[in-house]
Image (tube, rainbow, N blue to C red):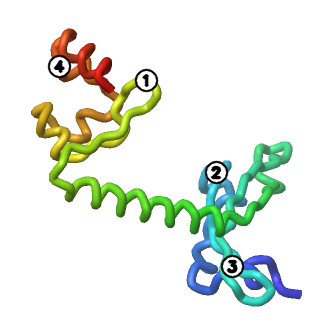
Amino acid sequence: GKNWFDLLVPQRIRDEVKDVFHKLMAGDIRPVEYYENPLLTKDGEERLIAFHNAVIRGPNDQIVIVLFSAEDITEQKKTEEALTQERNLLQALIDNIPDAIYFKDDKNRFIRVNKARADLSGTTPENMMGKTDFDFFSPGASRQRSFCR
């Protein structure tokens, strides 16, 4: 029969994955508890798999068994990538609008700010994240701004 590596690991990374496994079993590298690797389905489709690992050691502290659970995270990763693209698109739109635009959380902290809004406070959008009006205006002006919303 074929071994696990030849059946499931894509050809382009097969030698590398085998090498890491053999080094792990020889004790040359430390085991990792989590990693992600592509694997092949029986139809040859590549899926991204998250591995959670544990090792069992023998009497001389050598690794004798590697236990792992595997979870297909292909769709999750695709969703995360799509969400990142949408966030980047939204930020690009916000950044290119000349009007001051910002979003705040339920504690009045800035969670998204465009350059036009940051310029009004004499700072950068990054510097405003997680802060409130109290960080940029006098106490009286901050209370007035909060009250007027």
Quadrant assignment for the C terminus: top left
The amino acid type of the residue labelled 1 equals Lys
Note whether 29 is above or below 11 in the view shown. Answer: above
The answer to whether residue 31 is seen in the rendering is: no
Q: Nearer the viewer, residue 102 or 52?
A: 102
Q: For label 4, count other residues whose C-alpha is less than 10 Å away and answer few (under 14), some (14-19) or many (20+).
A: few
1 and 3 marks in contact (CB < 8 Å): no
Q: Seen in the image, is 59 located left or right of residue 109?
A: right
Q: Label for residue 9?
A: 3
Residue found 63% across the figure and 80% down from its top: 14
Per the image, the residue denoted by label 4 is 137
Q: CA distance from mark 4 to mark 3?
A: 58 Å
Per the image, the residue denoted by label 2 is 32
Q: Residue 44: x percent and y percent?
A: 72, 88
Q: CA distance from mark 1 to mark 3?
A: 48 Å
The amino acid type of the residue labelled 4 equals Phe
The amino acid type of the residue labelled 3 equals Val
The amino acid type of the residue labelled 2 equals Val
Note whether 48 is above or below 127 in the view shown. Answer: below
Q: Looking at the image, which residue sits at the far front? A: 148
Q: Label for residue 86?
A: none
**Does label 2 or label 3 sit earlier along the sequence?**
3
**Does label 1 or label 2 sit earlier along the sequence?**
2
Q: Label for residue 107?
A: 1
**Which-is-in-front pick, marks 1 and 3?**
1
Please tell me whether mark 4 sits on a helix, a strand or a loop.
Answer: loop
Q: Seen in the image, is 48 located left or right of residue 137?
A: right
Q: For label 1, count other residues whose C-alpha is less than 10 Å away and answer few (under 14), some (14-19) or many (20+).
A: few
Q: For label 3, count other residues whose C-alpha is less than 10 Å away and answer few (under 14), some (14-19) or many (20+).
A: some
